[in-house]
Image: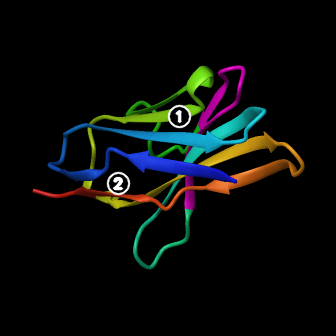
């Protein structure tokens, strides 16, 4: 069983910063892609950023230059540094990890989400 624990969400004013963390635990051989999605009320879940094991990254156009994704392979942890936050960044942020697990092969796992609210 693989569990993802997210932290770091909260309320912040426009222009502020937050850092999200997501730690994967359980019987994991190796993690591959790790990333963050978000879903605002009434909208579809969308990709925010993704990072591959070798460190290559991809970002949604709306967050380029403001958000930075990083990972610690030894800790099976992915981070999302969010700067210059805007009200339109308000959403529930979900962590996802692609992992090789004994007896199950490679599967995608999701966290429960953490709320980010940007408001004055």
**Residue 110, quarter of the rendered image:** bottom right
Q: Secondary structure at mark 2?
A: helix
**Residue 89, quarter of the rendered image:** bottom left
x and y percentages locating residue 34 in the rendered image: 64, 39
In the image, what residue occupies the spot 54% across and 56% down? 111
Classify mark 2: residues with Cα within 10 Å, few (<14), some (14-19) or many (20+).
Answer: many
Q: Is residue 73 above or below residue 97?
A: above
In the image, what residue occupies the spot 78% across and 33% down? 29
Find out whether residue 52 is within the magenta segment: yes
x and y percentages locating residue 117 in the rendered image: 26, 58
Between 17 and 103, the one nearer to me in the picture: 103
74 sits left or right of 117 in the view: right
Is the magenta region chiefly helix, strand or loop? strand
In the image, what residue occupies the spot 54% across and 33% down? 77
- Which residue is label 1 attached to? 78
102 sits left or right of 32 in the view: right
Q: Are marks 2 and 1 in contact (CB under 8 Å)?
A: no
Q: Is residue 51 above or below residue 46?
A: above
Q: Secondary structure at mark 1?
A: strand
- Which residue is label 2 attached to? 89
Between 33 and 59, the one nearer to me in the picture: 33
What is the quadrant of the C terminus in the image?
Answer: bottom left
Q: Which residues are magenta?
A: 46-58
71 sits left or right of 29 in the view: left
What is the quadrant of the N terminus in the image?
Answer: bottom right
């Amino acid at each position: 069983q693989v569990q993802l624990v997210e932290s770091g969400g909260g309320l912040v004013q426009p222009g502020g910063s937050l850092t999200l963390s997501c730690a994967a635990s359980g019987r994991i051989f190796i993690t591959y892609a790790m990333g963050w999605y978000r879903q605002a009320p009434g909208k579809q879940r969308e990709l925010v950023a993704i990072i591959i094991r070798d460190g290559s990254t991809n970002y949604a156009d709306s967050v380029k230059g403001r958000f930075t994704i990083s990972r610690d392979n030894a800790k099976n942890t992915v981070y999302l540094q969010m700067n210059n936050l805007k009200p339109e960044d308000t959403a529930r942020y979900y962590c996802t990890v692609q992992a090789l697990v004994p007896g199950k092969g490679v599967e995608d796992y999701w966290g429960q989400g953490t709320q980010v609210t940007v408001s004055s």
